[in-house]
Image (spheres, rainbow, N blue to C red):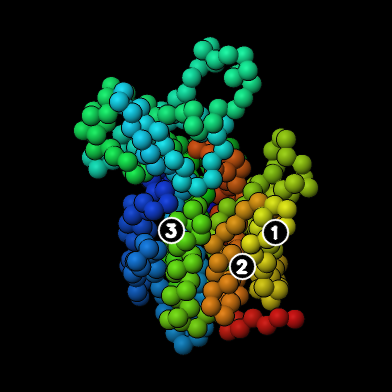
Amino acid sequence: MSKYYNELKRLLKLFIEASGPPGYEDPIRKLIAKEVKYYADETYTDVLGNYIFIKKGVNPSLPALVIMGHMDEIGMMVKFIDSKGFIRFSYLGGFFDQVTLSQRVLVHGSKGAIPGVIGSKPPHLMKLDERKKVVSRDNMFIDIGATSKEEVEALGIQIGDPITWVGSYTELQNDLICGKALDNRAILPILIEVFKNTSPKAPLICIASVREETGLQGARTSSFSIDSDYPLALAISLDIALAGDFPLVKDEESPIYLGQGPTITIAHGRRNSLGEGYIIHPGVKTFLVKLAKKYNIPYQLEIMEGGLTDATVIALTRRGIPTANIGIPTRYVHSPAAVASLKDISNAIKLLNLVAENLPTKFKRP
């Protein structure tokens, strides 16, 4: 197991420490292509930037399995550079202002990545009522050490350039790992390892999708085109799951635990109604649960309130596609210090290998 974990650790470090916010995923796509190109029968990049890699399978005429995981991480974008060289920024994806403040960042300009820090007025200079309020993005800026707008521009930075957190890969106790961008870089080793090592019964189509954090955009276009080219038996999106096994979270709020297996998402959507979200196809749920039980793979059932995944738009493509979402339990998501378990990542790979090798040709509703 340690030898296998070493490969997962290599891939996790590779992808966590690389940068690729929504719309700027090219560096991640290149890393994935390098890992899978010798195992693929076909690869291509579509107009939006989704990377598709395909194995024909034992019987290429059978309905295909699609596995999708998004490449992007939440990020920022240069919005304004003031005369003193300080940078104002927009968000790309869902941020929590309290987590944003005082973080280290990289500003990715045309001449390379420039380090900076997110600053604001210190509490010593605040009035009493100011100290009681959360500092909002409007009252933050990025300091790269420049003294003028001209100096910033000379470094190759301009409006629209992407910005990412600094958060290196770190190993914690009990097979836990930590770093930025676990949503969704904890998923990419799963996508790669399943593709490399499985002998699929039917065509296996893996999609590293783009711009999930800004509206599931890559999943929408790629699933539409794939459904035109192949008969599809099943699509599975891979994403994080919201672990709640730490202080201040009640069990009933998020009964998901690190190390107890990947999640099979029953439904997700808006917090008050699960609206605009996804509900698993009942035949797919039965198939996944039976498979996990038969081969003693730990799993957890999940209902995620307050979030969406690529499964949302895959399931509604054209006539509709039988779809599931598999999640990796993760603490402190959308921060530069998220935490996940190698055990859960490994068990997700085992489950997906079995799905590819035991894929039904059709899923019926009861």
- Would you name the residue on which mark 1 appears? 274
Identify which residue is drawn at 62% across, 14% down. 128
Q: Amino acid at mark 2?
A: Ala
Label 2 vs 3, first from the N-terminus: 3
The residue at the far top in this view is 124
- Would you name the residue on which mark 3 appears? 210
* Quadrant of the rendered image containing residue 267: bottom right
Above or below for 297 versus 307:
below
Label drawn at residue 324: 2
> In the structure shown, which secondary structural element does the residue marked by tag 1 occupy?
loop
Identify which residue is drawn at 64% across, 81% down. 363
Q: Position of residue 227 (x, y in %)?
A: 48, 78
Identify which residue is drawn at 60% across, 61% down. 326
> In the structure shown, which secondary structural element does the residue marked by tag 2 occupy?
strand
Q: Amino acid at mark 3?
A: Val
Which image quarter holds the C terminus?
Answer: bottom right
> In the structure shown, which secondary structural element does the residue marked by tag 3 occupy?
loop
The span from disc 1 to disc 3 (Cα, nearest Å) is 24 Å
The residue at the far bottom in this view is 61
Q: Position of residue 209 (x, y in %)?
A: 44, 61
Q: Are marks 1 and 3 in contact (CB under 8 Å)?
A: no
Q: Name the mark nearer the viewer: 1 or 2.
A: 1
The residue at the far left in this view is 154
Please state if 322 lies on the left or on the right of 103 as rendered.
right
Few, some or many C-alpha atoms within 10 Å of disc 3 (few <14, some 14-19, many ≥20)?
many
